[in-house]
Amino acid sequence: MTTSTQVHLVRRPTGTPRTEDFATVAVDLPGLGRDEVRVRNAYVSVDPYMRGRMNDSKSYIPPFGLREAMTGGAVGRVVESSSAALPVGTAVLHSYGWRNLAQGPATHFSPLPETDLPLSVFLGAAGMTGLTAYAGLKRVAGLREGDVAFISGAAGAVGSIAGQIARKLGASRVIGSAGSAAKVALLKERYGFDEAFNYKDAPVREQLRGVTPDGIDVYFDNVGGDHLEAALDRLNTGGRAALCGAISQYNSTERTPGPDNMGNLVTRSLKLEGFIVGQHQDLQPEFARQMTAWLSDGSVVFDETVVDGVENAVGAFLDMMNGANTGKMLVRP
């Protein structure tokens, strides 16, 4: 009997998740049925949106079930197959994350192109992460040639790619926030940001004002809270904000006060739009062509923080929520 090591949610967290809310479980896998595959995961993704799925509340994606394996993005190779479409050795992308071995109908697994890029890139820069940045900037915010763009949480998985895509789409200046001096240096020296600041050094409102003398035209929001409030201060007339996430509030147990400057939406004709990457899958072919070319020629770079062992996936998730990662946080089962 083949065993899959999986992470199960056993209790819904209140506030910040704790390790006791999860369990690592060994599950015996049955033999393959017709047109099924078994995949050894090479990398699994832990992402901020997963915190919302730990709550039993209505959202754009169903909550995790209790005492069953959590799901999420993963890449790996087929190690056993009863499907002619996915023979042994095929590299695949799928949603059976949080485990070392995945099994299910072949239709639940998408074959990946064989490239010189590492498989992990299809969970990050060339995957949902990159498409999120691309769709948010190009379609939701409508970034135009010459725009000044501000990216919050810019050293994270989405933010680090969003800053580079903003430049590719014609931004004249790109500004980012991050949570340490080392990450600020990385934004400017590796990812090509014109300006960056450590949001822990002083109020974001003050720091953003200091580095945007002419305001901003586009805001890509991964953080919410004080970052959104600061951006509303600095958005020029006709400015646009793509609201991707609000990680600063995901573990909050109390009502979070809203920005005190919402009146700027009216006086400056601002547009704030929240979005989910799944709403923009029609951009995938265009994005894949662009990003594959940019990654191949080195004009877009990416970083990963990799934690070994599926039993350490919860720790990786908690570290990611606390900003311990640079670029994409991944678990190598």
Image (tube, grey):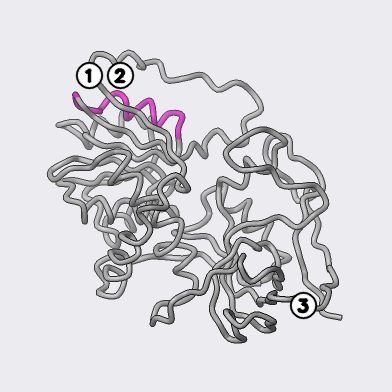
Q: Which mark is residue 244?
A: none
Q: Residues within 10 Å of mark 1 (few under 14, many from 20)?
A: some
Q: Are marks 2 and 1 in contact (CB under 8 Å)?
A: yes
Q: Measure the C-alpha gap from mark 2 to mark 3.
A: 56 Å
Give the residue drawn at x 62%, y 80%.
78
Q: Name the residue: 82% across, 75% down.
A: 3
Q: How dense is the environment of label 2, judged by Cα within 10 Å: few (below 14), some, or many (20 and up)?
A: some
Say left or right for 267 vs 38.
Answer: left
Q: Is residue 256 visible?
A: yes
Compute the Cα span from label 1 to label 3.
60 Å
Q: CA distance from mark 2 to mark 1?
A: 6 Å
Q: Which numbered circle lies on residue 32?
A: 3
| Residue 93: quadrant of the picture | bottom right
Q: Which residue is mark 1?
A: 268
- Looking at this view, is 241 or 28 the one in front? 28
Quarter of the image where the C terminus is located: bottom right
First reached walking from the N terminus: tag 1 or tag 3: 3
* Bounds of the magenta segment: 224-237
Say if the magenta span includes residue 309: no
Q: On the image, numbered disc 2 is attached to which residue?
A: 265
| Tag in front: 2 or 3 | 3
Q: Position of residue 201 (x, y in %)?
A: 39, 38
Q: Main secondary structure of the magenta part?
A: helix
Q: Amino acid at mark 2?
A: Leu
Please tell me whether residue 231 belongs to the stretch shown in magenta. yes
Q: Residue at x 44, y 46 (%)?
A: 179
Element type at marker 2? Answer: helix
